[in-house]
Amino acid sequence: MDDQCKEMINHIGRLQGQLESVKKELMRGDSAECGKASRTLLSSLRSFEGLRTSFITMFLDERFLAKRTLSAGEKIELKDLLALIKG
C-alpha cells in the first residue's frame, strides 16, 4: 500500500470520527447542541470533498497518467480539470 492510499485511509478514519460525533449529538436529542452538530457536519462535508478530490486525483494518476507522458498543453488541461473538480 502506497503513502497516498494510507493517507486516504487515515482521512476516512477522521471522517468517520466526525460523523460519529454528529450521530452522538443527534442521539442525545439536546437541541442546545444542534449548533455544535451542524458545525461538525459542515466540517465533515468539507472533509469528504477533500477525500473525493484526492481519490479522483489518485485514480487519474494511476489509471491514465502513469501510462504515458503528457504534452505541455495536456498538463495545463489536466491542471484545469483538477481545479474544476476541486471546485
Image (cartoon, helix red, strand yellow):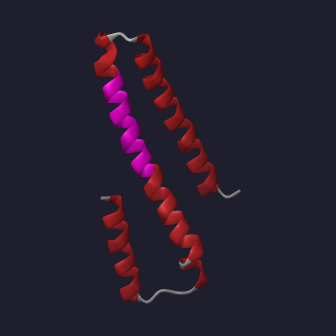
Q: Please tell me which residue lies in front, 7 or 34.
A: 34
Query: In the visual, does 4 lie left or right of 42?
Result: right
Q: Position of residue 49 (x, y in %)?
A: 40, 50
Q: Residue at x 53, y 78 (%)?
A: 65
The answer to whether residue 73 is above or below residue 7 is below
Query: In the visual, does 35 lie left or right of 66?
Result: left
Q: Please tell me which residue lies in front, 29 or 54.
A: 29
The answer to whether residue 3 is above or below residue 21 is below
What span is in magenta?
37-50
Which of the 4 quarters of the picture holds residue 73?
Answer: bottom left
Total marks shown come to 0
Query: In the visual, does 76 lie left or right of 69?
Result: left
**Quarter placement of the N terminus:** bottom right
Q: Position of residue 80 (x, y in %)?
A: 32, 73
Q: Residue at x 54, y 67 (%)?
A: 59
Q: Please tell me which residue lies in front, 29 or 49.
A: 29
Q: Residue at x 43, y 57 (%)?
A: 53
The answer to whether residue 8 is above or below residue 43 is below
| Residue 60 part of the magenta-drawn span | no
Q: Position of residue 46 (x, y in %)?
A: 36, 43
Q: Position of residue 74 (x, y in %)?
A: 40, 85
Which of the 4 quarters of the picture holds residue 87?
Answer: bottom left
Q: Residue at x 59, y 56 (%)?
A: 4
Which secondary structure is most common in the magenta stretch? helix
